[in-house]
Structures are given as C-alpha cells and as structure tokens.
Image (cartoon, grey):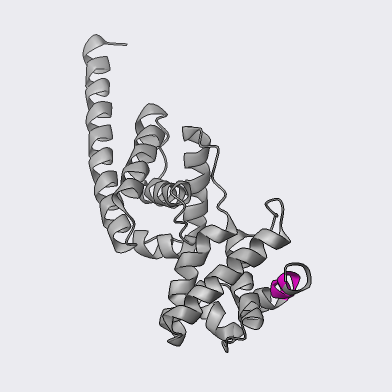
Amino acid sequence: MDPDLERAQQWWSTNSQDESLQLGNSEIRRVTAALDLPKCTREEASRLFYVATVEENHLHGRSIELVVAGSVYTAAYLNSIPQTPREVANEVGCNTNDVHKGHRLVVGQTYVTKFRPDAVDYLPRFAQALHAETGLDYQHTANLQSMAHHLIDKTFSQKPNTSARVLAASALYAASHVEEVSITQSDVATATDVDEATISRHYKTFLNRGS
C-alpha cells in the first residue's frame, strides 16, 4: 500500500475512534444521570465502552447507541444496581433488542464473567417503586423487601434459570401475603414492569417452598 495512503487511513481511524469515544462517553454520562446511577457505574460503563470500541475495535458496523446501551446495562449489573432493558432503552433511545445485543457484545468482548444479577439485587429498587406506586408507608415497604429477600434465599439454594426480575417481583407479591399487606398483583406489575400473568405463575413457589 502507498505509505501516504496508509498514514491517511491510520489518521482517519484514530480520529474516528476519538470522536466515537467522545460521543459514547457523553451519552453514557447523560444516560447514567437520567437513570440516577452512581459515579462508579458511569465509570465502569465508560471502561466497557472503551474496551469494546477501541481495544477490540468492535464498533465498526454497529451504532454507538447499541454499544452505549450494552455498556450501561452491563455496568449496572456489575455494580449490583440492575436496570431493566426497557429502562435503559428508553433513556438511550433504542429498543430492548438493541440493549440485549449490546449487552452480549460487551460481555463477549470485555471478558466480563459476572453478568447475571441476583433477584435480591432488584429488591431495593422494586420496593421503592412499589412505595411510590401505592403510597405504602416506609415500614411496610421495608418489611416487604426484607421478607422477599428471606423468601428468595430460602426457596433457592442455587441461582435459578428464571429471570431475576421475575423472581424479585413475584417474591415481593408473595411477601405481601406473608406480611398481610394489602397490595395487588397489578400494583406489583406496574412497579416492577413484570406482567401480572407472569407474577401469578411464580409467586406461589415462594409461598409453597419458602415460608
């Protein structure tokens, strides 16, 4: 290859990467702020984005939004503050399939080994959302969260294949039965973004095996 042409291609590639990093980091700051995620999660997302796009050079042919979504989604998992695909998608401006694709890309290219959240990781956020949805007082909300945690630990000795989000939502509803707190499946479904039919299929597992 002509030396001048090779230098021009290297210059273009470097500048393109710099622009992508700047844009990606700007988006990560915006999205993590909108999701109220802490600085450590933002920094982890930026690290994942850098490795995936620069060190592994896997941005080519993919949108920056997809890699940003995957980086934020994965970083939140790693910091035990998991977000739902819909929450990330809404803030990034993509669809949930893009979040999943970005997540798989980031996990595959950054050698992340821990990427599945535990159901208990969702409980603080879900309990807070339930409080906001129903107006349930703080004491009852705390009791539900504590009981849901207990039911999950007692029911499953190993991490099950069922979605952690589904288990957390179902455990909260099961906990309302144990604690005799008057909330509905609809309340829990709205607060957790898990549909009522799914909660209905799973919550009795906790009552039969965990109480």
Q: Which residue is drawn at 69% across and 78% down?
A: 200
Q: Where is residue 69 in the image (x, y as percent from the top left)?
A: 41, 52
Q: In this rendered view, identify the residue nearer to me: 123 or 16.
A: 123
- Count the marks: how many? 0
Q: In this rendered view, identify the residue nearer to me: 174 or 163.
A: 174
Q: Where is residue 123 in the image (x, y as percent from the top left)?
A: 52, 65
Instruction: Specify whether 13 is left or right of 197.
Output: left
Q: From the image, which quarter does the N terminus lie in?
A: top left
Above or below 210: residue 134: below
Instruction: Specify whether 22 is left or right of 52.
Output: left
The furthest residue to the right: 208
Majority SS type along the magenta span: helix
Q: Position of residue 39 (x, y in %)?
A: 29, 49
- Is 203 within the magenta? yes
Q: From the image, which quarter does the C terminus lie in?
A: bottom right
Q: In this rendered view, identify the residue nearer to me: 112 or 140.
A: 140
Q: Splitting the image into 4 quarters, where does residue 167 fall?
A: bottom right
For residue 193, say whether it is visible. Answer: no
For residue 97, say whether it is visible. Answer: yes
Write down the region rendered in magenta: 201-206
